Image: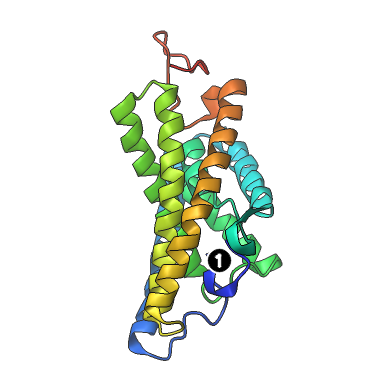
Amino acid sequence: MIRCSLLAMHMPDGYLHATTPIAGMIWLGTWGLALGLIALCLKRVQATYDDRAVPLMGVCAAFIFAAQMINFPIPMGTSGHLLGGTLAGVLLGPWAGSLVMAVVFLVQALFFQDGGLTVLGANIVNMGLVGTFGGYYLYKGIRRLIGRDRWTGVMLGAAIAGWVSVVMASLFCALQIGLSGTVDLGLVLGAMLFWHGFIGLGEAVITLLALDYVRRLRPELIYKAPRDRSGVASGEMG
């Protein structure tokens, strides 16, 4: 997320040294969670999504992949980029959204060396499980409070969830790095949470802009989009 290896959300190879019992548990545990998440997502997508969702998943993956390549500046000469987990969840639902994010991380690791292959499990957990599932269900809760069929709830919920998801994903990433003994826990926690608080603001803005664009053109593409009294998805704010 930031051009600094200590603060990178895409954890590089070597950051989870399996030289201590707790580091080995973190490494194996995150791989187990990631593989389990992918298997469960595949099963749920096959069971609950129709063929029309497949092209949308591809478009969403391509957009998030491209958007992650664009960095925006934050204070002190560093920069961040879109994480995209909450956006994927809002557009596709948590299952398809998490599957899309896992594919994005795999392609980035294989072809662009953005995140290591040995720690791909941890990256999928942090940005797929925490970022997408956590972001989606926070968004869903906020949307219910404001009104399920109100676009205000969609937009506000997505913005808040986008910010929180980035901060929480950075927390999990920092805990894994610190507990593995790679970097001092206090140092990595403070640095990651501080800077990703700024990056989360960029996440919220980009998520809002992307959703507003979809709302205006094809509101029905948003997962469980607000409906008017006739049951049709409408892009009108309310």
What residue do we see at 39% from left, 64% from top? Answer: 171
Q: Amino acid at mark 1?
A: His
Q: Is residue 125 visible?
A: no
* Camera-side residue of 209 and 117: 209
In the rendered structure, the answer to whether residue 179 lies left or right of residue 107 reads: left
Describe the element under mark 1 as helix, strand or loop: loop
Residue 145 rendering spot, x and y as whole percentages: 29, 29
Q: Residues within 10 Å of mark 1 (few under 14, many from 20)?
A: many
Residue 24 rendering spot, x and y as whole percentages: 39, 83
What residue do we see at 46% from left, 66% from top? Answer: 192
Name of the residue lying farthest toward the left: 145
Q: Quadrant of residue 125?
A: bottom left
Residue 216 rendering spot, x and y as whole percentages: 59, 21
Q: Is residue 53 visible?
A: yes
Q: Quadrant of residue 20?
A: bottom left
- Number of on-image labels: 1
In the rendered structure, the answer to whether residue 168 lies left or right of residue 56 reads: left
Name of the residue lying farthest toward the front: 76
* Camera-side residue of 33 and 88: 88
| Image quadrant occupied by the C terminus | top left
